[in-house]
Image (cartoon, helix red, strand yellow):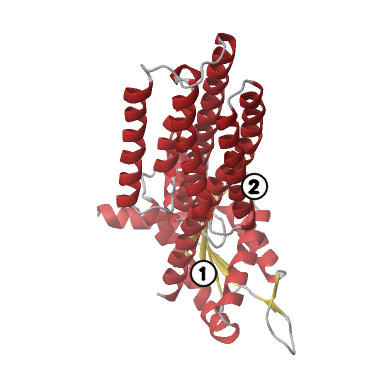
């Protein structure tokens, strides 16, 4: 029960880490937006001043101040929600004022439209406030269109300036949108990859988990039936593991599991499958290995485990711990349609015999015993 709780805690921590990474990515996006805003609005200050639109030049000075404040807060991790409010307020207010002052055709309303998806993906808002803010921004954009699109601007700019602003703002808005979508697409793909990893691997040892081994078994069994290749199973159990936990603590127990899993993995072929079967048990599926070969491999693994040294937290005395493991080996005959559970049960029976024989050994389940079991089943 304790081991299961620890596994659940690790999975929960992994999911929490993914959430934190998504949040950090969002705030990095806001920080980047602030720096881009500073550069763009400094350009607008010069542009509007040179074209005699002094009021908008001063407005853009205020915009630069807001973006600079936002960038400072975000870079220092201070009140990020205030920085977010500054960015959204500036985007919406600037879109309204610029559209009213120099005309709808300049395209400053594009940025107000962009504020809507930003409000949707903001991860710190509660759902009711998120809905209200999105509705408010949508109403603002629609109202701006109704009130400003058909009226003459307060300050008429030359046509080439209007066209230049329009295409600059359109290009900038599309670039920001592409960047946002690409960023969140990458986050989604990364989250999918992490979820797949959580679903198919053991969080402590990073080996395959039971579900993945079952899938690997189905694949290899179908290939065995079509090619006739040998397929063997090795079940490995760390000796006296409960005593290790009781004596040295669960942290050392975790190190033992990790060290043994690394030892097993480093002494197997790439074509073999290794999984944590549960608790202190590991299961190995050897592809193309008959029973005699599987026994020799298990013996090599047993010797390698004996040579594995694990660091402990002992202040005095032995600071390293040596462990042993017992191995049960069984083989699957190509002409027998047998389930994984039955094959594992035979390897487990061999493992149990090894435990009774004094542990730290390799025991096998021979073909003859398998044939006898099949005959008994159909008798």
Viewer-closest of 119 and 323: 119
Expressed as whole percent of the image width and height from the top left, the position of residue 41 reads 61, 33
Quadrant of the rendered structure where residue 32 is?
top right
The secondary structure type at the circle numbered 1 is: loop
On-image quarter of the C terminus: bottom left
Alpha-carbon neighbours of circle 2 within 10 Å: few (<14), some, or many (≥20)?
few
Can residue 78 be seen in the rendering of this structure?
yes
- At 72% from the left and 87% from the top, the residue drawn is 315
Expressed as whole percent of the image width and height from the top left, the position of residue 18 reads 50, 53
Circle on res. 269: 2
Viewer-closest of 324 and 62: 62
Q: Nearer the viewer, mark 1 or mark 2?
A: 1
Residue to which mark 1 is pinned: 280
Can residue 232 be seen in the rendering of this structure?
no
**Relative to residue 142, is residue 276 drawn left or right?**
right
Task: Please report contact status of discs 1 and 2: CB closer than 8 Å, yes or no.
Answer: no
On-image quarter of the N terminus: bottom left
């Amino acid at each position: 029960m304790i081991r299961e709780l620890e596994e659940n805690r690790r999975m929960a921590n992994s999911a929490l880490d993914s959430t934190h990474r998504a949040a950090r990515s969002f705030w990095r996006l806001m920080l980047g937006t602030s720096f881009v805003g500073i550069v763009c609005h400094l350009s607008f200050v010069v542009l509007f001043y040179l074209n005699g639109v002094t009021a908008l030049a001063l407005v853009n000075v205020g915009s630069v101040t807001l973006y600079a404040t936002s960038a400072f807060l975000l870079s220092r991790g201070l009140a990020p929600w205030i920085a977010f409010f500054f960015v959204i307020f500036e985007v919406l207010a600037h879109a309204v004022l610029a559209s009213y002052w120099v005309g709808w055709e300049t395209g400053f309303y594009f940025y107000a439209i962009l504020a809507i998806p930003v409000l949707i993906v903001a991860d710190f808002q509660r759902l009711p406030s998120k809905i209200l803010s999105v509705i408010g921004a949508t109403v603002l954009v629609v109202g701006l269109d109704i009130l400003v699109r058909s009226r003459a601007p307060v300050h008429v700019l030359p046509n080439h300036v209007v066209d230049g602003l329009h295409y600059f703002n359109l290009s900038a808005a599309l670039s920001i949108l592409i960047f946002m979508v690409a960023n969140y697409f990458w986050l989604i793909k990364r989250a999918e990859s992490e979820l797949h990893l959580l679903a198919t691997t053991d969080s402590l040892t990073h080996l395959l988990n039971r579900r993945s081994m079952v899938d690997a078994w189905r694949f290899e069994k179908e290939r065995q039936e079509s090619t006739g290749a040998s397929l063997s199973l090795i079940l490995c159990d760390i000796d006296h593991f409960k005593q290790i936990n009781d004596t040295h603590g669960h942290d050392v127990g975790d190190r033992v599991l990790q060290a043994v899993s690394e030892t097993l993995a480093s002494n197997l072929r790439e074509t073999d499958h290794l999984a944590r079967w549960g608790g202190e048990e590991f299961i190995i599926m050897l592809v193309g290995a008959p029973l005699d070969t599987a026994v020799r491999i298990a013996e090599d693994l047993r010797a390698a485990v004996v040579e594995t040294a694990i660091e402990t937290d002992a202040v005095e005395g032995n600071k390293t711990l040596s462990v042993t493991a017992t191995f049960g080996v069984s083989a699957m005959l190509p002409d027998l349609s047998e389930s994984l559970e039955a094959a594992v049960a035979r390897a487990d029976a061999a493992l149990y015999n090894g435990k009774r024989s004094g542990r730290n050994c390799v025991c096998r389940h021979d073909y003859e015993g398998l044939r006898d079991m099949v005959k008994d089943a159909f008798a």
